[in-house]
Image (cartoon, helix red, strand yellow):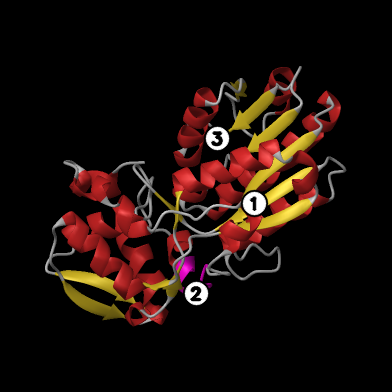
Amino acid sequence: MLFVTGATGFIGRSLMTHLERSGIDAAVYSGRMNDPLTLREQLQGMDTVIHLAGSEARGRSRLLQHVDIEGTERLIEESRRAGIKRLIVVSRLGADHHSWHALLRAKGEVERLVVGSGIPYTIVRASSLYGHGDRYFELIVSMAIWSWPFVWLPGGGRVPMQPLWVEDFTRCLLLILQQQEEMTNRVITVAGSEQVRYKQLVERLLAAAGIRRIPLRIPLVLLRPTSNMLFGWWYWPAVSRFFADRFFVPEVTDHDIVLRTFGFHPRRYEENLNYLRRAGLRWRMFRR
């Protein structure tokens, strides 16, 4: 049976919907990731784990240690005990346990733990995902609403991005589940089929949301101090240092990587922007 951590998160909600539609039974983990007793109890009778849980949205380095790293350590220990036959773990493009950036360093450490676990694994490194309820496109638009009459362009908006629709990412996860032998003990990269500069991306998002703003270039050297000053005290910061990492380590790869690996074309991001027009988006940056 399938066991899913982080099932109530952004990716998890999409995944659980697709699993239900496909008639695949899945148990949802309910507990702290670094709680071995709860993991031990709920892993009984499971054979495959999809590990989505993480603390990126909280923007706190100490939580990366507790949730992402220590949580993965506990999950691996209890998965061995329960006889789990396969781990599917979601990571990020640029993950590296030697990285200067806290999020990418934590994801790299998670990957290192999984590879050394002795359990057959598939690691999926993804670019930033967008869709209804994201903390990516919706935050860009909501920040533009509140920063009237300007919209920030860190580094002049020159950094390339390769966003992937969350529904396409979920489709990749389902194909990984189906193609067990081909995907075992591999690190797989997924991203959208379009590489776009941040300035162009912002222009398209604001146009889709019906908003006009004056572009304001922010030197990258000021990005972290400014975002920490404005948002660092929030419990759920809208713009964390992890959001800023996108501008220092571009999330780009081959434009046809999903097609070559999974045999389908990801949706163009401009085809999926209607959700940016919904009521209440103004308050998105204040919500989890």
Q: What residue sits 75% from the left and 41% below the top?
A: 73
Q: Which residue extends farthest right? A: 118
For residue 116, the mark is none
Which numbered disc flags the more N-terminal residue, 3 or 1?
3
- The magenta-colored residue range is 245-251
What residue is pinned by disc 2?
A: 248
Residue 279: % across, % down: 16, 41
Q: Which amino acid is tagged 2?
A: Phe
Q: Secondary structure at mark 1?
A: strand
Q: Give the alpha-carbon distance from disc 2 to disc 3, as whole Å.
A: 27 Å
Q: Give the alpha-carbon distance from disc 2 to disc 1, as whole Å.
A: 21 Å
Q: Give the alpha-carbon distance from disc 3 to disc 1, as whole Å.
A: 15 Å
Classify the position of the N terminus by image quarter. top right
Location of residue 174 by image quarter = top right
Does 190 lie within the magenta span?
Answer: no
What residue is pinned by disc 3?
A: 6
